[in-house]
Image (tube, helix red, strand yellow):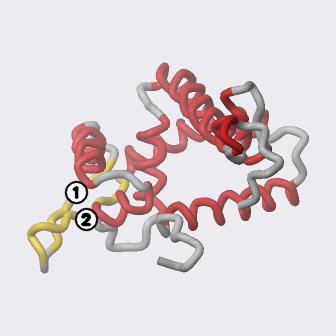
Amino acid sequence: MDSSNSDQPGGRVPTNFDLYREGGTTPSIRLSINLVLVARRWRALLDEKLRPIGQSSARMEAMSAIMNAPDPNAQIDIAKRLRIEGPTMTRMVDTLSRDGLVAREQAPHDRRTNYVSITANGLVALEEIFEVVDPLRDRLFEGLTEEQIVTLNDQLGLLLQRLDEGLPDEQGD
């Protein structure tokens, strides 16, 4: 790297941190910060609005993933889809099962594997959740065209794929 035109002490090329420390930013820094803030704020808003009906965004995500997973629904596969740890999923399934929203059944071929399915009460609860969430989602995306939403989905899907792959270095290691 050519550091001859660097304005850093010792002729060092400024880094993103140097820029950010001085109050500057880049489009990629802003985007990464905004991704975190949007996700955090969306979950907080959902939790706030779902609390009166005894639900949460985490419960919604788990029940939705269970409902839409191909049969049989191995609990560990649901956890992987949600990108959460197995013990976290176990605690969630314990709670949902205790509330009668999902059913857990031991796999006949492997005592270590549990299958989960949504119950009739779970479907009712998930429908109630969607009645709360749908208007919020509509307001969040108001003014975006379907094409813009598809493009955002494609771009976020690519970022998620890269994260799932562990962000291999440039040489593919």
The residue that mark 1 highlights is: 104
Work out whether residue 21 or residue 30 is closer to the camera in this orientation and state it: 21
Assess disc 1: are there few (<14), some (14-19) or many (≥20) residues with their C-alpha within 10 Å of its C-alpha.
some
Q: What is the crowding at mark 2: few (fewer than 14 residues within 10 Å), some, or many (at least 20)?
A: some
Residue 25 lies, in percent from the top left, at 76, 36
Q: Residue at x 44, y 31 (%)?
A: 55
What is the tally of numbered marks visible in this picture? 2
Among the 4 quarters of the image, the one containing residue 121 = top left
Q: Residue at x 48, y 63 (%)?
A: 68
Give the image location of residue 48, x and y in percent: 54, 21
Q: Is residue 145 above or below residue 168?
A: above
The amino acid at mark 1 is: Arg
Q: Position of residue 148 (x, y in %)?
A: 86, 55
Question: Which residue is drawn at the image coordinates 71% and 39% (left, top)?
Answer: 137
Mark 1 or 2, nearer chain start: 1
Is 41 above or below relative to 156? above
Where 102 falls versus 34 (above or below)?
below
* Side of 46 where 6 appears, left or right: right
Horizontal side of residue 77 vs 104, given as left or right: right
x%, y% of residue 39? Answer: 60, 38
Q: Amino acid at mark 2?
A: Tyr
Q: Which residue is mark 2?
A: 115
Residue situated in front as seen by the camera: 68 or 80: 80
Secondary structure beneath dot 1 equals strand
- Mark 2 lies on a secondary structure that is strand
Q: Nearer the viewer, residue 63 or 163?
A: 163
Q: CB atoms at circles 1 and 2 under 8 Å apart?
A: yes
110 lies above or below 150? below
